Image (tube, rainbow, N blue to C red):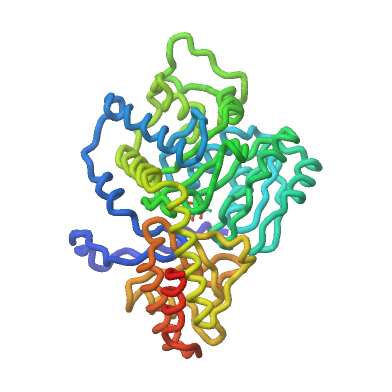
Amino acid sequence: MSLVLPPLSSLDDPSSALDDLNPLPRLLMGPGPINADPRVLRAMSAQLLGQFDPQFRLMMRETMALYRQVFETRNDWTFIVDGTARAGIETALVSAVEPGDRVLVCSFGRFGQLFSEIARRAGAEVKVIEVEWGTVFTPERIETEVKAFSPRLVAICQGDTSTTMCQPLEEIGKICHRHGALLQVDATASIAGTPLKADAWEIDCITAGLQKCLAGPSGAAPVTLSDAFARRIYRRRHIEEGVRPNGYVPGEGKMIGTNYFDLAMVIDYWSDSALNHHTEATTMLYGARECARIFVKEGHAAVFKRHADASRALVAGLSAMGLKLFGDLKHKMPNVTGVYIPEGVNGDRARMGMLNDFNIEIGTSFGPLHGKIWRIGTMGYNARKDCVLTTLAALDTVLAAEGHKFQRGAGIDAARQSYLA
Ligand SMILES: Cc1ncc(COP(=O)(O)O)c(C=O)c1O
């Protein structure tokens, strides 16, 4: 059988590539990315520095200090991995998990599936447990499975954007530790939108991204590692030829099977020994630092309230338009809302109407939910009253054009009212 590469359309007239880069100003109200805070974009336009410039090394330490506050941790090893959020997930998993280690993946959506995919590629013996999309795990179920499987590592999302559900984590770390497992959490979609307490909840590793509630672009992955998690990785330390320090002795653990995502070397890079591993993505570091600075300055409680207010208003508005919300609302993420596409409405055409006529993007969905629900984000810079009201106003017009029967204007009024309450 001949191998077929995927289709690729080339430009008939490549001269547009010489035009100014001038995208239409979209309001991004999907599950992420969302519009970046203008302060983050400004920070990212600062001039570059050399990665070993003392000014830059200071910025790296400041960034670590800021993210310790974001993650509510005293973990030394709190830093940025260059790459999108899945780079953070992958680097932590492939560096902590040795081939043959048992990994228990608790999956309640597409990003649980991503964990099992990465763990399998790392050579782990993977067990996946699932709940129906739109629900979350009970701690009892997780404890039973941990006891039965004895994993080295348990992996779970906090917010799985694909289902809009938020998994309570308060007890999961303690359960893992009672049974000798480490806990890794993907908080890409929930960090800075809902409480996340690395130390109090005993989470060994949290990885994240900037492009949701942290109001930045994708491309940098904040991570925090407990001492136990960092040690698990560092026992596999094998520094590449050419940059080995005098007296270097490799770790006793198996060499990590990737160079770029070798978190032992990345730890050395961020440490005072400043191993020359990669060239830090300077501009992303500026952006990541600014995202954390803005969050810390506004304050955890104020940011979480802003997200909760926007979510409540959106839910009130959608309900007043006669729309049905998806999933177990008790566990809905406060920054993404799933809503059923009403009977008779063409979901993709309605989304395109929002985009083409109003410059507003809302999200479609994956897997079993594809074509059934839209996902609307109210997060980060866009967790604001004006964004919620503008989105509902556009949806009002588009749904009416699609023939959906509802009281025009009721959604916008209900959302405004929710902000007054
Ligand atoms: C919960 C969750 N995890 C991981 C990712 C992957 O992030 P990235 O696309 O930045 O690699 C996403 C992206 O939407 C996400 O929502």
- Give the number of marks: 0
Q: Nearer the viewer, residue 90 or 56?
A: 56
Q: What's the residue at 49%, 38% (across, down)?
A: 223
Looking at the picture, does residue 195 appear above or below residue 253? below
In this view, which residue lies farthest toward the top? 247
- Given residues 248 and 72, the one toward you in this image is 72
- What residue is shown at x 49% (from left), y 45% (from top)? 208
Residue positioned 55% across, 24% down in the render: 234
Q: Position of residue 44 (x, y in %)?
A: 27, 45
- Residue 281 location (% of width, % of height): 34, 38
Left or right: residue 286 compared with residue 180: left
Quadrant of the rendered image containing residue 225: top right
Residue 173, image quadrant: top right
Residue closer to the observer: 316 or 270: 316
Residue reaching furthest front?
421
Q: Residue at x 41, y 33 (%)?
A: 65
Question: Percent from the top left, x then y, of residue 205?
Answer: 57, 38
> Which image quarter holds the N terminus?
bottom right
The relative height of residue 219 versus residue 370 in the rendered view (above or below) is above
Q: Position of residue 356 (x, y in %)?
A: 33, 76
